[in-house]
Amino acid sequence: MIKALSYVVVHTPHLAEWLKMAGEHIGMQVEIVQPGECARLRVDEKVQRFVLQAVDGESSMVMGLEASDAAAFAQAREALQGAGYETRPGSGEEIALRGVADLFHFADPDGCRVEVALGLQDAATPFVPGRPLGGFRTGDMGLGHVAFITPHFEAMCHLYKEVLQFKVSDYTSVPFRVEFLHVNPRHHTLGIAYTGGPRTLYHLMLEYNDFDDLGRAHDLALENPESIGVTLGRHINDHVTSFYLKNPDGWMLELGWAARTIGPDWQVEELSGMSLWGHDRTWLPADKREHARQILKDLSKRGLRAPVVTTSQTAKVSQ
Ligand SMILES: [Fe+2]
């Protein structure tokens, strides 16, 4: 029904800072739509993967989920309506700005807008990264993954698993409940967490094709260590090597490399931690950081390791 996270729409009071980070640091291609008001960011051949819109108030992020085809688009709308969600068609202006064939939107159990889109146009020009790099891993795996905290955990899991037919990848209940869900070979497209706290957008993961491009993003982040919200590490479930960069709105972009893919033979697992090593969450209270360190030490004593599997590295060596 849903085949991928296709794009996101970010409403931000810090548009200029976002554009600088996106182009110079992460290496996305910036296309100004309306100076000071609106921009589109590219990471691949598609016309956009981020729509940035300036706002005066609080920042927010809208997920754009891509339906598999026209039948799936209609099926998703019917399923949502059948489950009691009110769906509204996108405006002509919204459809044009995103470069999709059609879209509708609804409010999730936290009241946050979610878009379901049909198609996403290729751009008329090749992708030109904001700094030299080997591109981002998207294709049939979509833009990346999103993780958020919700006070309506059961309703949110029902929405994505039962109504929109996402499949469980794995889950944990320690230190809090998280379910990781997939719709394509990307290990997870959504991470839904319950901490007892309010709705909080945690991060959006983008994956580089090349390890060296992640390393260079990390070098740039080290020029401003405060910008690193989670240090370099490797996740226990999708095996991605990554660090988390605070964006100008305070939530984070996880920049990663070599996440594993999963197939139809996937077995759902309960996780024994969040990371194999690293990933010190600099924003956590001291006792929780120490607890996380103990989990890593225990995993280390057990010798838990995972192979690095990547088919995305670009072969060309630039002089
Ligand atoms: Fe992540």
Image (cartoon, grey):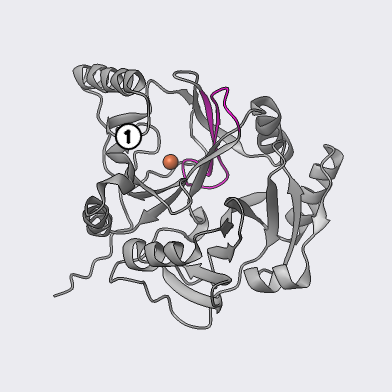
221 falls in the magenta region:
no
Q: Amino acid at mark 1?
A: Thr
In the image shown, does 300 or 91 lie closer to the viewer?
91
Q: Quadrant of residue 297?
A: top left
Q: Is residue 29 visible?
A: yes
The residue under the point 45% across, 73% down is: 30
Instruction: Provide the residue span drawn in magenta.
Output: 177-198
Q: Is residue 43 visible?
A: no
Compared to 146, does 236 lie above or below? Answer: above
Image side of residue 202 versus residue 258, left or right: right
Image side of residue 295 versus residue 15, left or right: left
Q: Quadrant of ligand 1?
A: top left
Can you give x and y, in whole percent of width and height, for residue 187 in the image? 46, 41
Q: How many marks?
A: 1
Quick one: SS at disc 1?
loop
On-image quarter of the C terminus: bottom left
Compared to 234, does 123 lie above or below? Answer: below
Can you give x and y, in whole percent of width and height, for residue 56 in the image? 61, 59
Where is mark 1, residue-wise? 282
Can you give x and y, in whole percent of width and height, for residue 20 in the image? 39, 66
The residue under the point 24% across, 57% down is: 220
Can you give x and y, in whole percent of width and height, for residue 199 in the image? 60, 35
The residue under the point 19% across, 17% down is: 301
Image side of residue 18 versus residue 278, left or right: right
Dot 1 surroundings within 10 Å: few (below 14), some, or many (20 or more)?
A: few
The residue under the point 45% across, 46% down is: 250
Name the residue at the left extreme: 319
Compared to 22, does 31 lie above or below? Answer: below
189 falls in the magenta region:
yes
